[in-house]
Amino acid sequence: MYKLFLKRIIDFTASLFGVVLLLPIFLLVTVFLILANNGKPFFIQRRPGKNGKIFKIVKFKTMNDKKDTNGNLLSDADRLIKIGSFVRKTSLDELPQLINVLKGDMSLIGPRPLLTQYLHLYSDFQNRRHEVKPGITGWAQVNGRNAISWDKKFELDVWYVDHCSFLVDVRILFKTLLKVIRKEGINAANAATIEPFNGE
């Protein structure tokens, strides 16, 4: 009952309330990023959702598009702008994904949507993460986020698929709030983002 019906109702109601409540912060961050990022406050990218269906995720753009002399993008750490660093540490970069939740592409709680180029690399076990909608936060995020290995991340994602319930989601939500307040597990060691997934 919860996974099939109630979860979507809670997602829609809570995300709508969140958008209205956080609108002043949303607008303020947008203005700052427009000024700091050459008029580009948002990062939009194709990601796989439930059953691998592709959707466009929306996040605040925390990195610039600077390239080296060969035309290649600089490393994530080198492109992370100052205001972007603050936005990422406070997890405000995830705020626009409430729009994805309203649209039904995502849930508030679920495995984080990864890159489309990883799809062909997953084992059958790893691919089970797509049996539910991706989330803004999830079981892997409250148990290490970017600071854990890919193997552990997939293990935690599949655990959530098998144990999704209202009580589990409430637990993840409260643990997420604690993680945000403490700024824990945001970046992998010595990197702005986790290392790319290269398969088993």
Image (cartoon, helix red, strand yellow):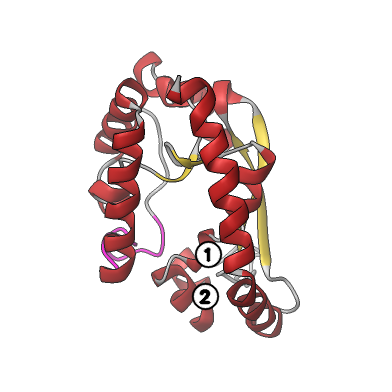
Identified at 44% across, 25% down, the residue is: 2
Q: Secondary structure at mark 1?
A: helix
Residue beneath disc 1:
93
Q: Disc 2, disc 1: CB below 8 Å? A: yes
Does the stretch in magenta take in 46? no
Quadrant for residue 165, please give it. top left
Pick whichever, 121 or 148, lies toward us.
148
Pick whichever, 39 or 196, lies toward us.
39
Whether 148 is drawn above or below 34: the answer is: above
- Tag nearer the camera, 2 or 1: 1
Label 1 amino acid? Answer: Asp
Please state, as top left, top right, bottom left or bottom right, where the N terminus lies in the image: top left
**Start-end of magenta stretch:** 183-193
Q: Residue furthest right?
A: 39
User: x, y percentage for residue 63?
Assistant: 56, 69
Residue beneath disc 2:
84
Please state, as top left, top right, bottom left or bottom right, where the C terminus lies in the image: top left
User: x, y percentage for residue 100?
Assistant: 64, 46
User: x, y percentage for residue 125?
Assistant: 35, 17
